[in-house]
Amino acid sequence: MGVETGRITTDIPARLDRLPWAKWHWLVVIGLGTVWILDGLEVTIVGSMSDALKDPTTGLGMTSSDIGFAGAIYVAGACVGALFFGQLTDRFGRKKLFLLTLAVYMLATVATAFSMTPAWYFAARFFTGFGIGGEYAAINSAIDELIPAKYRGRVDVSINGSFWVGAALGSLLTIPLLDPTVINPEWGWRLAFGLGAILAVGILLVRRNVPESPRWLFIHGREQEAERIVTDIERTVSDETAGELEQVDETITVRQRTTIPLTLIAKTVFTMYPKRTVVCFSLFVGQAFLYNAFFFTYGDTLTTFLGVKQTGWYLAVFAVSNFAGALILGPLFDKIGRVRMITFTYVFSGALLGVTGLLLGTVTAFSLTLLGVIIFFFASAGASAAYLTASEVFPMETRALCIAFFYAIGTAAGGISGPLLFGYLIDQASVDKDITGIAIGYFIGAVLMIGAGIVEAFLGVHAEGRSLESIAKPLTAEDTEQRTAV
């Protein structure tokens, strides 16, 4: 397990979990959680700009298959970035990586705005995804380690759902940017990508004030720094809530390590927690295919088959319903419980998607959007809970890499194949102008979502209201040897 540098008994986890909600926690939410707004902005801009990118004069002369490939290459970059930065996050800390990954994203999205050829565009999209993927690993782990246990479910689900705030923002922004009477078509789509970099600068300024995770610090031999940070947080929260904080008597003893070998992390995932591994894989594959397949090509479907010239309003309405679902249903993951809510949202949204596939031959732009609004109101909360699950059911030393691993594996299976499949189906179906040709994608997504919901029902973890250390003891905890696999 690496060289032991000492042993300490600490009450830091209990002190963080007993804190009442305060303004300080909003700093964490805004500074870290807003990364999903960037991701939503990126994905929506691409979906809204299919026609602009296809134009050989003012765009890049891309086909529907190229648009699908661009979506796939973005997701591929996110998978690679998640794995690359995930292990660095567990090794070097949350804060260093959530600053670095945001910088990578900013540079890559600016490069996208200056694309001159499809090849340049594809490369820029890969590195944009590379940065965003790294963000997922660094941010989810940091948020869950800083937010009190009784709020963790609703906060995590809502933050992951904020992807759709970016989606709505991107949809509305593309309306004037793609209007040739407002701005030159040659520059409109480029400015849209540049807006992501501007938003990222603002997030970076706030993020600098978010501290390193005290949980990560004390396990890596920096207990004095962890103590100082927690004391500062307690003082701030006490001042903001004008109340005395209750005392805690729960402690944990850990064997400190500077590094945790990747071999131990792999052993943890596959041999110590095999059931949890199956759950996370199922949840990520289901939601990744559902979302990436449908949403990456939703704008293209509207323009190709349903005669829509300006997709921004449709995408905005769709996005609002997704965020509303995560925001409204989020508290239920703490009150009703993880297993019940994840099972319901996955199975119900999957079944509705299957019905939509059967109705494709009769839909209009309005009715397809309405069906999408209903489906993804529930699916968004379930999909957000997939990230919550991966971030809380494995030991702290492996948290960021586990998030990265399941995101990469699940997204590679669903997020790369989905856009590629739908891009191909749209190209083939557009020859006959027959929208039912894309129904097979809906059916695959439905089966995967329902299957994941069933897996959750039987193997899911009841993590609501529990400390991270009680859900999965740190690998460095003194009684690690007595832990049984679950």
Image (cartoon, rainbow, N blue to C red):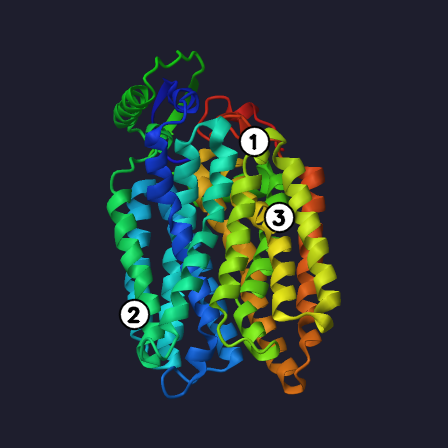
Number of marks in the image? 3
The secondary structure type at the circle numbered 2 is helix
Q: Residues within 10 Å of mark 1 (few under 14, many from 20)?
A: many
Percent of width and height locating residue 128:
37, 63
Sequence order check: which comes first, mark 3 or mark 2? Answer: 2
Q: Choose between 363 and 122: the one closer to the eye.
A: 363
Percent of width and height locating residue 318:
54, 58
- What residue is rendered at 52% in x and 79% in y? 64
- Quadrant housing residue 385: top right
Q: Is residue 130 left or right of residue 267?
A: left
Which disc number belongs to residue 282? none
Q: With respect to residue 40, does 206 lie above or below?
A: above
- Quadrant housing residue 364: bottom right
Sequence order check: which comes first, mark 2 or mark 1? Answer: 2
Res 413 seen here: no
Q: Choose between 454 and 47: the one closer to the eye.
A: 47
Distance Cα–Cα, label 2 vs label 1: 41 Å
Mark 2 touches mark 1? (CB < 8 Å): no
Kind of residue at disc 2 = Ala
Residue bearing the label numbered 2: 111
Q: Nearer the viewer, mark 3 or mark 1?
A: 3
- What residue is rendered at 37% in x and 14% in y? 245
Q: Nearer the viewer, mark 2 or mark 1?
A: 1
The secondary structure type at the circle numbered 1 is helix
Residue bearing the label numbered 3: 378
Residue bearing the label numbered 1: 334
Percent of width and height locating residue 113:
31, 71
Q: Choose between 143 and 47: the one closer to the eye.
A: 47
- What residue is rendered at 61% in x and 35% in y? 338
Percent of width and height locating residue 455:
69, 44
Kind of residue at disc 1 = Asp
Q: With respect to residue 458, does 41 lie above or below?
A: below
